[in-house]
Image (cartoon, rainbow, N blue to C red):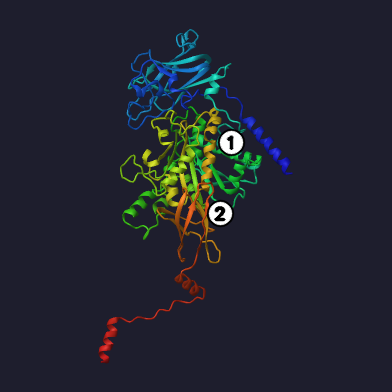
Amino acid sequence: DDTSRSETNVSCYKSYRAICHSPSPECPPMGMETLKIDDFQLHASTIKRYGLGAHRGRLNIQAGLYEDDLYDGGWCAGREDPLQWLEVDARRLTKFTGVVSQGRSSLWSSDWVTSYKVMVSNDSHTWVTLRNGSHDLIFTGNREKEIPVRNVFPTPMVGRYLRINPRSWYGGGTICMRAEILGCPMPDPNNYYHRRNEVTTTDNLDFRHHSYKDMRQLMKVVNDMCPNITRIYNIGKSHNGLKLYAIEISDNPGEHEVGEPEFRYLAGSHGNEALGRELLLLLMQFMCLEYRSGNPRIRHLVDQTRIHLLPSVNPDGYEKAFQAGSELCGWSLGRWSQDGMDIHHNFPDLNSILWEAEVKKWIPRKMHNHHVAIPGWYQAKNATVAVETRALVAWMEKLPFVLGGNLQGGELVVTFPYDRTRTQGAVRETSPTPDDHVFRWLAFSYASTHRLMADASRRVCHTEDFAKEDGTINGASWHTAAGSMNDFSYLHTNCLELSMYVGCDKFPHESELPEEWENNRESLLVFMEQVHRGLKGVVKDLRGQGIANAVISVEGIGHDIRTATDGDYWRLLNPGEYQVTARADGYSLTRKMCEVGYEMGATRCDFTLGRTNLSRIKEIMEKFNKQPIRLPVRPLRARRGRQRRWW
């Protein structure tokens, strides 16, 4: 029966989790990259300048394009001698087990440490150097500046402080490095450090990194646990033939219900940004378990929304990063597709097409301000388009998505279109869409409910202080990019798409996943709920049949949308009163005032369109297979000639 099957599924799920949660033989990272280690816990013998201070010596920290005195890409010593050191204060007794090191992040210089010693202390005055018998241990450092190198200590060392003492460095550069420390906190009787710095979760989920095979298995487990509200499908294959799996969560999986909006989250377009992938796997588990337990919020969301989660857009790239490991994949390993494409920026540049049409005043006479057509060259077989991108385009065109978010990593910010600057050659420039106010609200709904994103007191991830802007930014004002997923979604479909950069660390250690889940869980839910804000309705003809591809226009907003196959539509809008027009080929347009309230839930605004006289005449004549009567018209000159001869 259903009860016994349900209990069996739960038992299998717990057994599966128990197998997956075997203890790791190494201590996890202490948090140099994730910022758990505060700036005041980092010290150095000397520094070259403030922007190259000890606080910048964090694994994978990035320098700005134009390096400056505040945000450079690592710690650099002020002198070149073997007496320099970078120190970490763990603030409690810790079992140190290893060091991961990198060179300096820079486009203009080459600096890295090729060997170093490690020293440990309890009081920062008396230091013990790690030794190999009677000799000090010399660890092999880096051979270039980006690829991380991990050194695990032969014997763990217990202390509060750890120093890295560079012994040699690249001859063409100077003493510069970025680092992560591996360590396990020792038992703390007062539990002060735990209370102050750690976040725990009560959700019983599978907190670990999943290989492609593990991801498929987990999605199957969720589907088996909640077969009535989930459906697994794939949208295509990767370059290496891995299927791009998605899971649908809805009260009627596999069906589009009239009046029910469709929402999507996707992650992993950059394969090395693993946090977004794991958050979506956690989200599908959470929603299944909470729906089963009767959580009214989750039940309402699932019953009123068709939700699609695509956790791994670039599984080929992810497998590369996964095999290297969270600390050793660096900043870019696995970022691109197998054939070298940046999937997120591999879409057609529809911005230029639209903006050129605006300059030529073709809108709306020759071209619409929405559903901009994909150019022919992009659809050619030999175009430089990743197979994953083609699969995404087909997915976006097939389903009437209303709202979407793509999860990325390496920062804490939500970006919204446009992602390309209007001014040619401008690297940064605010480039708002006609729906700028709506996009800003959507971005704020995620950022403001994230535990850290909008916190003005938090440390910047790399070089940008996004918290001063409430954790949101227009994409083009950060850095311009042509052919982004967000711009394509807005200009080619009805879907408003945003990018959520969900953590400073692209590929956090699995021990960090419970806290990252707590950081993002409420934001993930709140953003989904925004799909029910604005207007919704059905456009019908006089017989009550839905009209597909009817155009919905809102006065004052130069971007229209279209109805889905059944004539239903959703128009995301902020609270206010709007004059809305519905029109379709062969029908008379209809206009009405519709009001959007502040409470959650879209306002119903339906339209009934009558056929135009011309379209009715054409329809009748086609029905009875009759041709229009065309009277022959003689040339005017001939008529005049006959008149003269008649006189």
Q: Identify the residue shown where x is 41% and y is 34%.
A: 466
Q: Is residue 639 left or right of residue 464?
A: left
The first of marks 2 and 1 along the sequence is 1
- Residue 276 in the image: x percent, y percent? 51, 37
Kind of residue at badge 1: Asp
- Residue 231 in the image: x percent, y percent? 60, 46
Q: Residue furthest bottom?
A: 647
Q: Identify the residue shown where x is 49% and y is 11%.
A: 122
Q: Which quarter of the rendered picture does the N terminus lie within?
A: top right
Can residue 192 be seen in the rendering of this structure?
yes
Secondary element at image label 2: loop
Kind of residue at badge 2: Gly
Secondary element at image label 1: helix
Q: How many marks?
A: 2
Quickly name the residue at label 2.
Answer: 259
- Residue 582 in the image: x percent, y percent? 46, 60
Does 640 sit above or below residue 320? below
Please name whichever residue, 276 or 166, is drawn nearer the observer in this view of the structure: 276
- Residue 608 in the image: x percent, y percent? 51, 63
Please name whichever residue, 39 or 30, is drawn nearer the observer in this view of the structure: 39
Query: Nearer the viewer's eye, disc 2 or disc 1?
Result: 2
Quickly name the residue at label 1.
Answer: 214
Displayed quadrant of residue 27: top right
Does 306 sit above or below residue 31? below
Query: Do the numbered discs 2 and 1 sit on residues whose CB atoms are within 8 Å?
Result: no
Q: Identify the residue shown where x is 65% and y is 46%.
A: 228
For marks 2 and 1, give the CA distance: 36 Å
Can residue 371 be seen in the rendering of this structure?
no
